[in-house]
Image: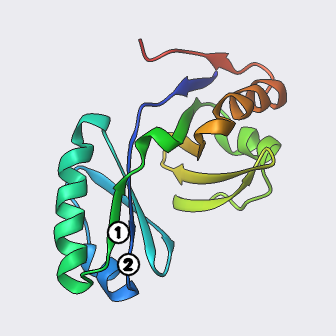
Amino acid sequence: MLELRPREVGVITCVADPTAVDAIGDVAKATVCRVAPDEVMLLCAPDGAPEIARVTAERATAADPDAIVLDAGDGWAAWTLRGDDLDEAFGRLSAVPLAPGFSQGDVAHVPAKILRSEAAIDLLVPAMWGAYLRERIVARCPGVVERSDA
């Protein structure tokens, strides 16, 4: 069975000189996603976002005093697909090659961030596209069961 769940996620964005972005390294309790040479997105539990932002800002500004670190969680909507035939379901939504880890590209005609683990696919889109993405997933993935986190 394929399941679709909304996901609450903290999103910290850092834009800085590429060497400062490199200096951020791994951050405990966050998934670090390299968006561009000078930009990284850190995904975490929503209640952990302030601490992740603080640590990220300390590390980035040590190498680039002009680094910008923002809590951008309100700007993103996230959905998790879990269950059987994840690769087939994703193929109905996107032509982006699905590899383990982080990627980005067009998903159902929306720019998306994609995080693939062994058991799930997390899709993040700008918040204004959240409902649209859910509708496209339901329409293109027959048999998907919607679940809530509540």
> Residue 29's mark?
none
Q: Secondary structure at mark 2?
A: loop
Left or right of residue 113, residue 131 in this image: right
Query: Which residue occupies 25% across, 67% down?
Result: 26
What colour scheme does the image use? rainbow
Q: Residue at x 45, y 39 (%)?
A: 74
Side of 35 where 24 appears, left or right? left
Q: Secondary structure at mark 1?
A: strand
Residue 83: percent from left, percent from top: 58, 29
Left or right of 75 in this view: 150 = left
Q: Position of residue 103 (x, y in %)?
A: 58, 62
Query: What is the residue that sits farthest to the top in this orientation?
Result: 150
Q: Which mark is residue 68?
A: 1
CB-based contact (under 8 Å), mark 2 and mark 1: yes
Residue at image coords 23%, 61%: 27
Crowding at dot 2, Cα within 10 Å, few <14 / some 14-19 / many 20+, comes out as: many
Label count reads 2
Q: What is the quadrant of residue 1 in the picture? A: top right
Q: Residues within 10 Å of mark 1 (few under 14, many from 20)?
A: some
**For the residue marked with disc 1, what is the amino acid?**
Ile
Mark nearer the N terminus (2 vs 1)? 2
In this picture, is 23 found above or below 133?
A: below
Q: What amino acid type is highlighted by mark number 2?
A: Ala
For the residue pair 61 and 11, the one nearer the viewer reads as: 61
Vertical position of residue 32 compared to residue 18: above or below: above
Please tell me which residue is depicted at 30% across the width and 38% down the height of the picture: 45
- Residue 16 badge: 2
Q: Quadrant of the C terminus?
A: top left
Which residue is most to the front?
66
The image shows residue 122 at horizontal and vertical percentages of 53, 42
Q: CA distance from mark 2 to mark 1?
A: 6 Å
Image-quadrant location for residue 130? top right
